[in-house]
Each structure stands twice: as structure tokens, then as C-alpha cells.
Image: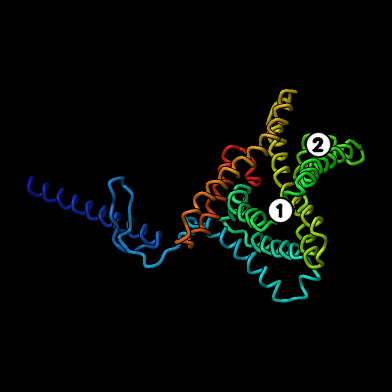
Amino acid sequence: KLKEHNAHDLEVGAEISWLSLKSLSKHHLDLQTDNGSWGPEETQDNGSEVSTHTLLFSLDYQHVQVPFEITLWIMLASLAKIGFHLYNKMPTAVPESCLLIFVGLIMGGLIYSLNDQSPPVMDSDIFFLYLLPPIVLEAGYFMPSRPFFENIGTILLYAVVGTMWNAFGIGLSLYGLCQVKYFNLQDVSLLHNLWFGSLIAAVDPVAVLSVFEEIHVNEKLHILVFGESLLNDAVTVVLYKLFKSFNEMPSIKLVDILAAIGKFFLVGIGGIFIGFLFGMFAAFTTRFTKTIRVIEPLFVFLYSYLSYLTAEMFHLSGIVA
């Protein structure tokens, strides 16, 4: 009887072990089917399962998203510029800047309609650190320096005083309109209106300058408009950052306003000093490149970009630098 009882226990234990093993195998097979993987798997020390299959092709767009999309933006603008000039009548009928804005609207509509899970990386930091420096460098490098410095007083009057007059005029006018009860905008503060005025004050007369070049206007008129458009960007950036910092303060005192006025002049003068410093470095370095001229364009880009980044690092005007 004892032998029969032990044999019965062994049979029951074997059946239970077999059912458990069968259930475990089925569960593991279901997990592999859900994951879409039929190959063997290995377990790392941390307990995570890693497939032993070697992928022949994989896509990691997030790894290169930022430089890839920046390059695409620049390539798109360059191809659009080439396309505009292939048709000689198009730039004369419609300004080039308007056509580029139209191309940007089309691309923005396509991106919005696709509703991608990884949206474009374009933001203010990307624009100010990667796209704006080459634009400013191109404008400053090919600027006729002699007529520019001969009329520097008038240019500064238009760029600094005129831009500030424009920004405060727009801000105060909009604040006056907000006080009208009919518009129901009494909750919009004066600071927000001035903030918007600083954003919209700078006018970039690209289309006007292109027309000036076509009709060959007076050189003095051309350099006044060109110099004002080059320097007013720095003024508006400073005003925008000042009003932005004011908006983040719980209360604005007279000391803050005086400090802002001092910072306004410090930003411009500091940008000039940093630009002068890197210009001296570039002039000294290019003395030794007579036999290796191939690196001179690289020095032009590097010193210019370093002056911009250094000025931005100290919260100075990178555009002026």
C-alpha cells in the first residue's frame, strides 16, 4: 500500500509539473507573438530582455533632428532663391522677401497638416544661434564700409532714436486703444503693449533695398536705409529682452528702469568692443596665411560666429558684434 501511495503521488506531481510547464511555454509564446519577435532572447544583468537579432536597417531621426532640419531650412531658402531668379520677370513683379514668406507659409501649412509626432525644432534659440548669424555676417561683410562710417551719426539716429520712437509709439498707441471700453481689452497692460511694440518696431527693408539696387539710387540714401536696417535689429532685440525681463518681475521700481537704460547702452557698446576684439584677432591670424589661403574663409566664419556667441554669452548684442 505504501508503494502504491508513493507511486500515485509521483504520478500526480508529474502531471502538475507537466501542466505548469505547458502553461508557462504557452504564456512565453504568446508574449513573443505580441512583441512580434520569434527569435531567441537574452537577459542582461539588469533584468531587461534584449533581442539577439541584428537589424540590417534602422531609423533614428531624433538623433539628427536638430542639424538635419536646420540644414533643410537653409537648403529650402537657397533653392527658392535660385528658383526665383530663374524667372527674370518674377523678382520684378513680386519682391523676393514676399516670395520667401509665401514659401514659408506653404511649408508651415504642410507641417501643420501632417501633425507629426516629432514637431520641428524651430524655435527662438535655434533661429538666434544658427540661422541669424550667417544672415548678419553676409549683410555686414558686403557692406560698403566707407560710406557707412561717413554717415554713422545719421544711421545711429535712425536706428536707435527712430526705432525706440517707433516701439514706444506703437506700444502707447495700442495701450490707448485698449482703454476704449468698446474693444473690451482693459486687461492688456502697458508693459505687454510695449513688449509687442518692441517686437514689431524693426522694419527690414529687403524689398526696398533690392529696388534701390535695380534703379541705382543715390549712394547716400542707399547706405542710410541699409545701415539703419542693420542696426535696428540690435535695438529691437535689446528692447524685447528688457520688456521680457520686466514682465517676469513682480514689481518694477525706478532703480530697475535706470538699470535698464544703463544696460541698453552697455549692450551696444559691449557688442562693439567684442566685435573689435575678434576683428583684431582675425587680422593678426590672417597675417600668417599667405601660403595656406584655403583656411582664410574658415577664419572669417569662425571669428564672426565666435564674436556673436561670445556677445550672446555675456548678454550683449551679438548682431552688433
| Above or below: residue 55 compared with residue 252 | below
Q: 151 above or below 260?
A: below
Q: Is residue 108 left or right of residue 31?
A: right
- Residue at (51% x, 54% y) in the render: 299
Residue name at image x 85 percent, y 35 percent: 186
Q: Residues within 10 Å of mark 2 (few under 14, many from 20)?
A: few
Q: Which residue is mark 1?
A: 146
Cα–Cα span, label 2 and label 1? 46 Å
Where in the figure is residue 214, as x and y percent of width and height? 79, 68
> Mark 1 is on which residue type?
Arg
Q: Residue 67 location, x and y as percent?
A: 52, 57
The residue drawn where x is 57% and y is 50% is 304
Q: Is residue 65 above or below residue 179?
A: below
Tell which of 171 and 50 is nearer to you: 171
Residue 264: percent from left, percent from top: 70, 35
Discs 2/1, front: 1
